[in-house]
Amino acid sequence: MLDRFDAQILRELQRESNIPVAELAERIGLSTSACHRRVKLLEAGGLIDGYSARVNPKALGLDLLVFVEITLTSQSQEAMNAFERAVMLYDEILECVLTTGTADYILRIVARDVADYDNIHRNCLGRLPGVSGMQTSFALRSIKGWRGYPVPG
């Protein structure tokens, strides 16, 4: 179970992963050494899975956010494994989740514009094995972007 210090560490690191340990310690009211020790324990325990920078997609010219619902011709283990292996080959597919409901998978994709998405559709999505249907939705604007998991405590 997380105590309040561990919960605060996780919240702060999700907001700003490159914060110096001394500043993190000051924010949550611990000594630098105690804070450092807790961070290392959270890493060793698998609660902190890694560190990364949040890159602004617009600054890279990636203005179009697309969600694609995929339905497979079969939900056999072989068909699903083949699809999942193929998804891993395309950097254009940012995220793929297996879902319940009408779609088997939902993909999150970014593109420069509609013409770029058309290219991704033809040369990436169109090559995925076992697909019987695709439903594409274009995001108009982000209301609440990803900022981390809720941390109890």
Image (cartoon, helix red, strand yellow):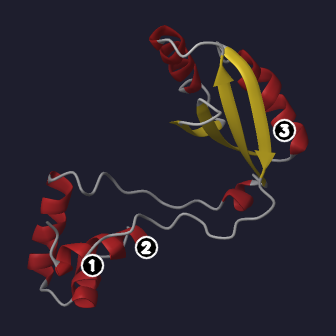
3D distance between C-alphas at marks 1 and 3: 41 Å
Q: Secondary structure at mark 3?
A: helix
Disc 2 marks a residue whose amino acid type is Arg
Please name the residue that numbered disc 2 is placed on. 15
Q: Is residue 124 visible?
A: no
Q: Quadrant of residue 60?
A: bottom right
Find out whether the residues at labels 1 and 3 contact each other: C-beta distance under 8 Å. no
3D distance between C-alphas at marks 1 and 2: 11 Å
Q: Would you say 118 lies left or right of 37 here?
A: right
- Residue located 68% across and 70% down the image: 143
Q: Secondary structure at mark 2?
A: helix
Which one is nearer the viewer's eye here, 139 or 105?
105
Ranked by sequence position, the earlier of labels 1 and 2 is: 1
* Place of residue 69 in the rendered image (x, y in percent of width and height, measured from the top left): 69, 35
Q: Quadrant of the C terminus?
A: bottom left
* Place of residue 6 in the rendered image (x, y in percent of width and height, measured from the top left): 19, 73
- Label 1 or label 2, whichever lies nearer to me, is 1
Q: Is residue 139 above or below residue 100?
A: below
Please name the residue that numbered disc 3 is placed on. 116
Disc 3 marks a residue whose amino acid type is Asp
Q: Is residue 63 above or below residue 25?
A: above
Please name the residue that numbered disc 1 is placed on. 8
Ranked by sequence position, the earlier of labels 3 and 2 is: 2
Q: Would you say 49 lies left or right of 132 here?
A: left
- Residue located 78% across and 45% down the image: 137
Q: Would you say 81 lies left or right of 67 here?
A: left
3D distance between C-alphas at marks 3 and 2: 31 Å
